[in-house]
């Protein structure tokens, strides 16, 4: 069976960048099965990229290679890495984008914002340093094409992660997506993502509110209770969405537009 | 030969939803050949989804499985179905989205708007009820991932439609796309779709006006005659487009922008 | 190994057009491996299409068939062609879109704008005239589906270019992308493309400025020097981008937005 290589970037689909990566992969491994996760991450929004990759990567077959490039530091000191996790391998810049590979307890060590965390047992990280697995000359502006795509192709051909370069004991992680417990017992979160329907995906997890009577506050509005499905509510509602996170939605409407909400807007959940 | 599975949704390509469906399909059938028809259906616009699916599905090889998800009723009472037609199988919610599978005479029974119609001979519909062909737990918000994608994968692996659940005698259809004959002999239609070029695709069929001297009225403008090709006309023109429907276009320009036209705008065709 | 067929169009991904082409290809050659280069070329912008195709096609494996459709003249006199180059075959309208197949010296013969140029040795062009390699009836509005997609599929199945129709000695080319040397020693160029990050890709080549002290002027702003990478500069900067062309960028920002720049805006490079 052909190996699956997924791509997650902030490149969009209008420019030739994604196609260049696909051409490089297919030139090295013509049997690779390339699947786009998203190229619509907002430019340089590493955390949003980590969310989108993390929301999709778990559905792919074991052995998938997940390449992600949201890389404001391209050409500077940040390291290009391969992160090997049970059942999947992640390739990209060491800036937190690959946090989906890390268990929540590890990410929790980066509670205050992106930070370097020690890798737990069962995970390994290596620098993509080996020139024979790169495209030359390596440009200073497009490691997706010259470092990450070739690395993914070589991994899909059976090259082992340790052949790419030195091992790292720590990688950069973004904090886990969950509401933070406040002294008054409420949860503090924020809008993590706005989807095509205008639904506000928050950092509060559905299992943090399940089975409890809650009030969700966002953009000066209060929502009582959590609804089971978008079609069951009326007006503004809170729903546990398909990523397991609390969402604010409007039935057949655009919650972000209605509320004027932006990514990063604070969300507060209180319990009755 | 690997089976073809097509996808048509209103999910857009920025969010992780489409990728989750692809991952689920590939996890069940790694040989599936997944092709996107469109993920740009306007949110919850079932009729537009039916048009886009219907404009593309006929070009795919026999045996293709067409999955479509424009599903404002997800998690409510509407049924998830598989609709088996000669040469192709359609999977999605029973809300009219799969109308491309139905002959025009059947769709005509829904003349006034989406309605339940009896299935003609040669077509069969079954409810997607069998838990072993679903992803568990089945979410209330994302049947694309948990019911429709797995169903398509299992169909592509040879599971027969009748194994999924009880047979239905009726399904929901949207009316056929054609101009309605008025008492004065004119045709009444409307703008069904606006394409990337700003061309207005109408509900009037090209073969309803072919070979006749016509005047097309839309947004307060009158167009005399039907032009053979976009490049042959000047200014505003009427053309029979590639879907066989009458279109209003501007040579190298944006008719929708020029006219301020929206989907649903009335179109009238009179004959000399 | 399955043959690669790439697609570059101005069709966007919302409409059914691209999917119709893919269905036609897969119906003729179920083993074809179809890769999108871009469907985001601005409507009818042939030169931008030539740039995007040219920026990606070189990364694909030898033997790839590159189909491009930016075709304001569809249904009029312009010829549909196959252009055979060493290692790749190009299919599309003869309007300059396929210029990536031509060496720079040949394109330079079209210095003043798109023009017919003689084909150099090693390249061959044939008209796509043979009805048995077309889809019938051939529409007047969608040669992508009825002529170009079938041609690509047949080429991928081993049909030779000369079987499609008469040979052409000349094809239409767009001028090469490079700054024009002015009498005062400066280079005159223009904005060729604006990418998703808002970077302005200019017609000036990086190797025209490399190793020299330059001032870049665009939209009334002056930039001193060329920076190595986006992350290394501050504010407005000039960088040689991944396509080998000079770009104007803002670190983690949107240069096109900041400057109010449009495609076609003049760019001037002076040397110290």
Image (cartoon, coloured by chain):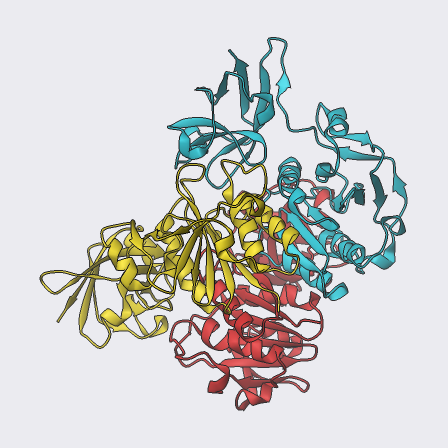
Chain colours: A yellow, B red, C cyan
Q: Is residue B95 visible?
A: no
Q: Residue at x 62, y 77 (%)?
A: B156
Quadrant of the rendered image containing residue B207 = bottom right
Foreground residue among B155 and B187: B155
Foreground residue among A65 and A45: A65
| Residue closest to the far bottom | B166
Foreground residue among A269 and B22: B22
Does C168 sit above or below residue B54? above
Answer with left or right where residue A183 lies relative to residue B11. Answer: left
Q: Measuring from the top left, give residue C124's x and y in whole percent.
A: 84, 40
Foreground residue among A110 and B45: A110
Quadrant of the rendered image containing residue C114 = top right
Quadrant of the rendered image containing residue B236 = top right
Q: Residue at x 22, y 62 (%)?
A: A179
Q: Measuring from the top left, give residue A207's x and y in whole percent.
A: 26, 72
Q: Is residue A152 visible?
A: yes
Q: How many marks?
A: 0
Q: Measuring from the top left, give residue A253's x and y in whole percent.
A: 37, 62
Q: Measuring from the top left, give residue C11's x and y in whole percent.
A: 62, 50
| Residue closest to the far left | A184
Q: Residue at x 85, y 34 (%)?
A: C121
Q: Quadrant of the C terminus of chain A?
A: bottom left
Does A87 sit above or below residue C48? below
Q: Quadrant of the N terminus of chain A?
A: bottom right
Q: Residue at x 52, y 73 (%)?
A: B149
Answer with left or right where residue B253 lies relative to residue C142. Answer: left
Answer with left or right where residue C59 lies relative to residue A233. Answer: right
């Amino acid at each position: 069976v052909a190996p699956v290589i997924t791509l997650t970037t902030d490149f969009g689909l209008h420019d030739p960048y994604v196609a260049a990566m696909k051409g490089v992969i297919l030139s090295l491994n013509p049997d690779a099965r390339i699947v786009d996760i998203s190229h619509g991450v907002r430019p340089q929004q590493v955390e949003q990229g980590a969310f989108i990759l993390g929301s999709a990567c778990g559905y792919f077959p074991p052995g998938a290679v997940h390449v992600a490039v949201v890389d404001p530091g391209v050409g500077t000191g940040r390291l290009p890495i391969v992160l090997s996790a049970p059942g999947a391998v992640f390739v990209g810049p060491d800036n937190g984008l690959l946090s989906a590979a890390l268990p929540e307890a590890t990410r929790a060590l980066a509670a205050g914002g992106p930070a370097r965390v020690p890798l737990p047992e069962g995970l390994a990280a290596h620098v993509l340093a080996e020139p024979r697995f790169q495209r030359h000359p390596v440009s200073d502006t497009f490691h997706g094409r010259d470092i990450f795509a070739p690395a993914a192709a070589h991994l899909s051909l059976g090259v082992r992660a340790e052949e790419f370069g030195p091992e790292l004991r720590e990688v950069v992680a973004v904090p886990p997506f969950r509401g933070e417990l406040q002294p008054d017992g409420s949860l503090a979160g924020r809008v993590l993502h706005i989807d095509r329907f205008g639904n506000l995906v928050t950092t509060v997890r559905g299992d943090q509110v399940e089975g409890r009577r809650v009030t969700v506050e966002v953009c000066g509005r209060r929502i009582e209770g959590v609804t089971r499905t978008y079609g069951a509510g009326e007006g503004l509602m809170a729903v546990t969405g398909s990523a397991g996170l609390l969402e604010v939605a409007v039935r057949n409407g655009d919650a972000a537009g209605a509320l004027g909400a932006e990514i990063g807007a604070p969300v507060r959940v209180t319990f009755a």
